[in-house]
Image: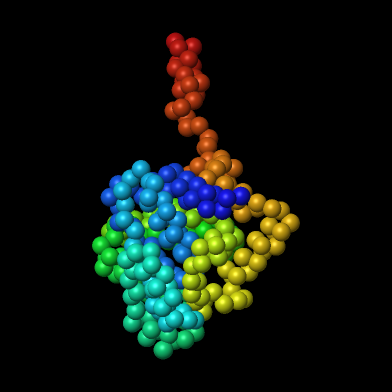
Amino acid sequence: MNLERALLRRVGEAIGRYRMIREGDRVAVALSGGKDSLTLLEALLRLQRRAPVQFSVSAFTIEQGKFLRSLDALSHWLQERGVRWLCLEDRPSLKLMELQPGHGCDLCSRYRRRAVYEAARSLQANVIALGHTADDLCEALLRNALFNGRIAALPPVTWSSRREFRLIRPLIFVSEHMTQLFVERIGAPVTPCACSLRTGGVRQQIRQLLAELERRYPHLKRKLVSAMGHLDTARLLDPRFLEGEPKETEAPHTAELPVLASRAGN
């Protein structure tokens, strides 16, 4: 398999199917320092040269005090590629680390979301590209179904609350196995975050469950992603999608019976 060709084809398919990038878009890639976001940035840079629409690519990183090594290598790597990059030190997040070192993911995500919009605004971007992969979609689907009681994953395209930014996920058809191989091949400087080392949480347990199942049943995650795009709503339990009993006004025989009886009595 030609890794680059397969990767770019899947990214291009996601972008085209869901109209993620449009003429004149200014795309800012959210770089977390991990393999997925680095793959996303490089894929967009390569697609930019051959895309039928014109768009720009920049990048940003939110410093929340959780990186396990310096960002100098990442900065140098981006400079070599001529990528405009903003590293935003989020002071509220750093204060949170100081005051509540054991805070949960939800609180951290809330702080990060505000900082992400601030960074994109500084870069004058109208599109924010996030590095969620097919693995993330599968994990989100199971997490929502098993623990939140709803069928939901991650949308390929969505909007910020004030519709200031369009948020896209071009890696939804790309596995983490592919991103791992790709960053190794291009020599991208992966900068790990302390969050990636956490164990014992629900997300980690679901990831381990999926990995174990896929060892037994290859392509399981690919089929799960495919299932998210082929819903059989008539076989689910949501009343909004179920065919109900016909209304009386819609049944010709019930509407005609009183008329016939009336004539018979005359």
Please indicate, yes or no, whether residue 113 appears anywhere in the rendered image.
no
Q: Residue 202: horizontal and vertical position, in percent? A: 59, 70
Of 248 and 239, nearer the camera is: 239
Name the residue located 51 percent from the left edge and 75 percent from the top edge. 192
Q: Residue 39: horizontal and vertical position, in percent? A: 48, 61
Left or right, residue 106 beside residue 57: right
Please indicate, yes or no, whether residue 80 appears anywhere in the rendered image.
yes
Of 264 and 129, nearer the camera is: 129
Quadrant of the rendering where the C terminus is positioned: top left
User: Which residue appears farthest toward the front when viewing the image?
Assistant: 80
Q: Residue 64: horizontal and vertical position, in percent? A: 40, 79
Task: State the scheme by which the image is colored.
Answer: rainbow
User: Which residue appears farthest toward the right when viewing the image?
Assistant: 216
Of 123 and 160, nearer the camera is: 123
User: Which residue appears farthest toward the bottom when viewing the image?
Assistant: 99
Name the residue located 38 percent from the left edge and 67 percent from the top edge. 80
Left or right, residue 57 beside residue 122: right
Q: Is residue 73 above or below residue 99?
A: above
Q: Is residue 86 above or below residue 157?
A: below
Name the residue located 57 percent from the left edge and 58 percent from the top edge. 178
Q: Residue 95: horizontal and vertical position, in percent? A: 37, 86
How many numbered circles does the render carry?
Answer: 0
